[in-house]
Amino acid sequence: MSLNFDPSSCVRASSKFSQCTKCVDICPVSTIKIVDNIPAFTPSSCIECGGCVGSCPTESFSLSDFSAINFFFGALEKKEHKFACKTELPCLSVLSVEHLIALALGSDEPLILDAKACACGGDSGVLNNQIEANIEEANFVLSSFSSKQILVDSLTDITEQEHEESVRDRRSFLSLKGAMKSKQDFDKAVEADELKKFELDSEVIMGIKDKKIPDKRKLLFSLLKRQKRPEVYEVLATEDVGFTSQKFVDASCTNCQICYRICPTSALSSDMKFSVINFDAMMCVKCHLCHDVCEPNAIQLQPGFEIKEFFEPKQRTLAKFDIQRCNECGNYFTYTGGVKECFRCKIEEDEAMELHENAKKMDF
């Protein structure tokens, strides 16, 4: 397997104001770094655990020979419900909270995970902590509408030495001292030891414009549609749900349009006249990008997340604006009262008045 990265899906490629560092924080060998505001990594240092794959809200990271969707349907077909690292998948950390909820809902048997057997993170324990946190969150969300839960148990008796050997094997470092069979092997080894950086070229920019819903969200939504609706919909604390959110927009919003233009999934959107801000919670991946770019900090998270969104998803209007034509240029703008003059024309008029006043002073 090899680690792949699609910069057009990364929220950091959409804006220099993005504060997302989830891939950096989860990497147990610190091979992922932020270079020129974009993630970069050294292929030979990657242990191919998939932690960055599971933690990325927009699925910009992937492993060449592993698909979480194929794994999901394969597990259902084989009726498998017990999983541990280095068995059917590279590491349990490759599965996000959404994947875990979907697996639990799709399985006839209780989902059992061996969270303690992971040695991919070495002494840092960063992956173990993430796996345990994902299981805890998945169980918390499941408990709000289902009797199913994810159990944690030891499935294998793997010694510490075997763990270390497995980690070494997965690294697959191409040593220059080893037996190189060809010049091609040598070139690959050299390339793998170099930091792989990514640039915002025209192809990436076009990809950023293509709004995409992550496969893990589509999978979860498909499973939820087959679930029996609870008699009472609970409201969970927003900090306890890490993969989606509900929002509101306060009065400080200027309708600058940045939030819904930059949203990677179109969870935030508007109409043809840009007179509203709409929001769909089931399309939100809680990447925080809209909050990072909002200058007046007008976009806020609701204190609670309504489970009703899982079963009765609804696009909500967070803000409405009075759109009028400018008396000067004829373009539409967000009208807040007074003279019907757009912001640009007002600036030009203020500058003209200032020049006029300066000219009058020079005449004296």
Image: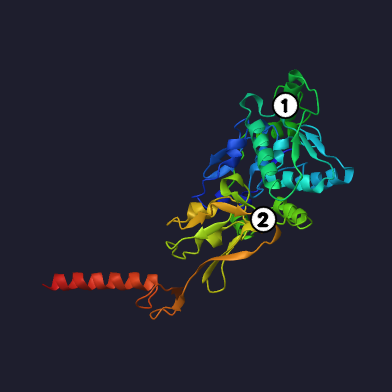
Q: Is 146 or 318 nearer to us in this picture?
A: 146
Residue 66 image-quadrant placement: top right
Report if residue 331 is visible in the image.
no
Number of marks present in the image shown: 2
Alpha carbon separation for disc pair 1 and 2: 44 Å
The foreground one among 98 and 89 is 98
For residue 26, which quarter of the picture? Answer: top right
Q: Is residue 79 above or below residue 246?
A: above
Q: Is residue 223 left or right of residue 354?
A: right
- From the viewer's perspective, is residue 103 above or below residue 253? above
Can the viewer see residue 222? yes
Few, some or many residues within 10 Å of mark 2 (<14, 14–19, 20+):
some
Marks 1 and 2, the one that precedes in the sequence: 1
User: Which residue is at the front of the view, 352 or 145?
Assistant: 145
Across and down, in percent, residue 36 comes to 52, 44
The image's colour scheme reads rainbow
Q: Position of residue 241 (x, y in %)?
A: 62, 47
Residue kind at label 2, given as amino acid type: Tyr
| Secondary structure category for the residue under label 1 | helix
Q: Which residue is pictured at 73% across the width and 43% down the height? A: 100
Q: Which residue is mark 2?
A: 233
- Numbered label attached to residue 225: none
Q: Which residue is mark 1?
A: 167
Q: Nearer the viewer, mark 1 or mark 2?
A: 2
